[in-house]
Image (tube, rainbow, N blue to C red):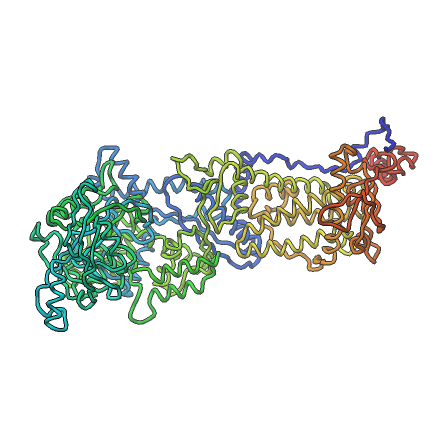
Amino acid sequence: MPDTDPNPTRDYRDTVFLPETEFPMRAGLPKAEPEMLKKWAEADLYHAVRKARKDAGAPLFVLHDGPPYANGNIHIGHALNKILKDFVVRSRFLLGYDVDYVPGWDCHGLPIEWKIEEAFRAKGRKKDEVPAAEFRKACREYALQWIDVQREEFKRLGVLGEWDQRYATMDFDTEAKVTAEFHKFLMSGQLYRGSKPVMWSPVERTALADAEVEYHPHVSPTVWVRFPVTNTATSQVFGDTAEEADELNEQLANAHVVIWTTTPWTIPANRAVSFNPKVAYSVYEITGMKTEAELGFAPWAKPGDKLILADKLAEGVLVAANASAWNKVVDVPAHVMSGFVLAHPLATLDAGYGFEVPMLAGDHVTDDAGTGFVHTAPGHGTDDYLVWLKSGRSLDSIPDTVNPDGAYYPHVPLFGGLQVLEVEGKKAGKFGPANGAVMDKLIEAGLLLARGRVEHSYPHSWRSKAPVIFRNTPQWFIRMDGEDGDSLRTKALRGIHATQFYPDSGRNRIGGMVETRPDWLISRQRNWGTPLAMYVDKATGEPLRDEAVNARIIKLIAAEGADAWFTRPDADFLGNGYDPENFEKVTDILDVWFDSGSTHAFTLEGRGDTAWPADLYLEGSDQHRGWFQSSLLESCGTRGVAPFKGVLTHGFVLDEKGMKMSKSLGNVVAPQDIAKESGVEILRLWVALSDYSEDLRIGKQIIQTTVDAYRKLRNTMRYLLGALNGYDAAEAVEYQDLPSLERYILHEVHALDQKVRAAYEVYDFAAVIRPVSEFCSQTLSTLYFDVRKDSLYCDQPTEIRRRACRTVLNILFERLTAWLGPIMTFTAEEAWASRFPKETANLFRVLEAVPERWANPSEAVRWGKIETVLSVVTAALEEKRRDKVIGSALEAAPVVHIADIALYEAFADNSGDLIDAAEVFRTSQATLSLEAAPDEAFRLDGVNTVAVVFQPAEGKKCQRSWRILPEVGSDARYPDLSVRDAEAVAAWDAAHA
């Protein structure tokens, strides 16, 4: 055992150069962050950095903000979005850009209207009783209130930008510019009014675009309905000969075409039945039925009934009808089918349904489900509408059956006034009595074959969450296709091809949507929004296209806001050249996606310190059908190209179990709570550590894991600050004079710097934080800091080994604070200011390239070999520590047997650059040997060429460095120190005499 002196004559702690810093171990982020935000605000940090970049001639980078809705406090999805945007802003500053970022808000639309309606109802006033101007004023005030709240919440996240020059879609000047964009479509002829089925929300009383609809599971009633074939008695109608016709007519006598639908309420609107000529159809005669005793009710079919069905689906339909036996009677060719004339199933109950129901051929019909026929109500379905018009029938022949409130019009036979969807009270958003009433009448008519229920995906309004219906209404559309070949669709697809997507899969996603999307429905029947400010000639039905009228409209909206359109007399807009009596003022408002899709026009154009198109749009993946697409269409329709060079999408935030957050489940994680409890820095680090291209998860355990990761990174910075205490540039050692270990660390810095730059270039923030974190915990904390601890603490300040170490530590501090600055912005700024309190903020720095000579693959190979040997020694010493043989590695003097000459020679190269094995192993002494290891030597699985024989360190314990060495006591001045430590203390004593 080592010979130690239990009573040292002196306390040497003052002579040891331990790390010293005021940078606290505990961050206290919830308190420290607001103080730092205040300093940034006082320094006008964002504009100060922009000015510095401009003065340096930096290239411009434009991040355009997709506007959140000004309604309620921000949630975790908002936090994810805005933090990612701040990563972009700060990383682009770091890479040397001047960055323009103007935050904005979407203010128009239904959610705010509902809130204001609720407020007025609470005061005993219905919406219809509130003057439009008063209602709009209340909406504006409500939105403004939430803009102020959300702005402060976003700033609390550390997000930099033009907060005082934010944009809002409700600003007067903005409404005028959106109107000007609308007028471009008006004047170019891309705008038209059409009457077609659109998705309609009775609860909201407005049409909805595809981007405003989401699909949820829904249970619907299903009905199989019989349509009697009425014209089979006419000789030679179908057959090639009279004999063939008579035979077929006899087989078709009293036959019924059967349809299947999940919307019984559309039966009153039926005007045709569609079939597919490529599908095989036949007549099936029922020969047996389940009994009433078996079923518990009387079946609606009976033996002898003849049903025309698709062959592939016939059995399923007959089973649903409770048939127990049937025969296939005859095939029905397509040319026969096309000649059928059917009767409406309600014709016997009311003469209003006494019209003929034709058979129409359509490719949309399949034999995958149902009966092989499609009940066709051209006012309530896109395919129905198209096949009806394709057959040569007019728009005027499409019936209006359901009013804006979701009820049948009074003129609808048998069902006038019945609600399809409830719009008031506790049942609002639920299907009304219409479905049941229609089924009852079909039973009365004897033509309901069967019914059931099915759960399927059904469209709902993304705002009200209520089901929507297809309803034929006159609306305004922007045409996607044109006759000249260079249509809006073509331009948009070309724009998608020219755009860089992050991830690249976004290209196919938005491309597929644009390829198949219908014309853009832009009109809404609401109050709170930017108007379709135009007039329609009552005589021709055509929009008035007059630039002078447009200019007057835009001028007044810019001065008074959109209210001007609704309150001023028409003469103020039309001028003296037109008689207001001859024109219809359009009072619809624009789709809010048109508002937000136009933001590029008034945020990027017309400002002196930005540029169009934007370098990047960044939003959630749902915006491929939302803001990304509306911006693309608006810009391509008015400028011919996309408004962005790049598009980045992120996923949604789920709880730790991968479930959607909801108050009812109690799994909501609020960013405000994280800020108060742990600090925004933890939220930022969570974002960076996550793969944002997929859905993200968050919860208590994930937050705690992030806190742990944060502490490791903070402790690395704290260690660097402490170890660099008093560092001066005069200490620096030139690269060629650095020891092998320092050259290896700089090689790793060179490689990591390239990774960080490449990752920031493509917005892959996880590819920044993960390798940097691993570098800090593995290469630095586990290897470099531990190996050089003895030198750093105990060598004389003038020793080149210690100076070389501090040289590299200085480089590490400068790189880490730069690399982590965009992500751990509060901590990086705190660390930078702690060391350089008089210098400009960390954000001002540009990440300059590291010297190429730092790339040193040979040192990387060398230290890879050394670390292989180290792993075996560490495991051997850990075994002795577990067995209580030693308490510290400094009590050991291992003999390391190395059978691989390359591993052995890694500890000394040809230049004589020796590696102190004891320092690497963190032992007091060590011996490397090429001799064969004894059998009892320690070996590590997977490393067959290294074996360790434990030996205790010989000598006395140095009371300063704690190393055990034979030389301790050889200097009479300091009998309890090693030679190195004795010289260091002597120098310290002389300096402090």
Q: Is residue 810 visible?
A: yes
Seen at 50% across and 48% down, the residue is 86
Seen at 71% across and 37% down, the residue is 20
Instruction: Measuring from the top left, give residue 728's x and y in whole percent.
Output: 73, 46
Q: Is residue 543 visible?
A: no
- Furthest residue toward bottom: 241
Instruction: Measuring from the top left, give residue 111's x and y in whole percent.
Output: 32, 43
- Furthest residue toward left: 351
**Picture quarter with the C terminus:** top right
Residue 755 or residue 560, whichever sits in front: 755
Instruction: Measuring from the top left, give residue 221's x and y in whole percent.
Output: 24, 46
Residue 313 or residue 516, whichever sits in front: 313
Image quadrant in which you'd find residue 116: top left
Disc count in the image? Answer: 0
Residue 416 or residue 681, whichever sits in front: 416
Instruction: Measuring from the top left, give residue 847's x and y in whole percent.
Output: 61, 54
Using the image, determine if residue 248 lies above or below residue 39: below
**Picture quarter with the N terminus:** top right
Image quadrant in which you'd find residue 982: top right
Seen at 45% across and 65% down, the residue is 498
Residue 980 or residue 248, whichever sits in front: 248
Q: Is residue 764 left or right of residue 975?
A: left
Q: Is residue 61 left or right of residue 799?
A: left
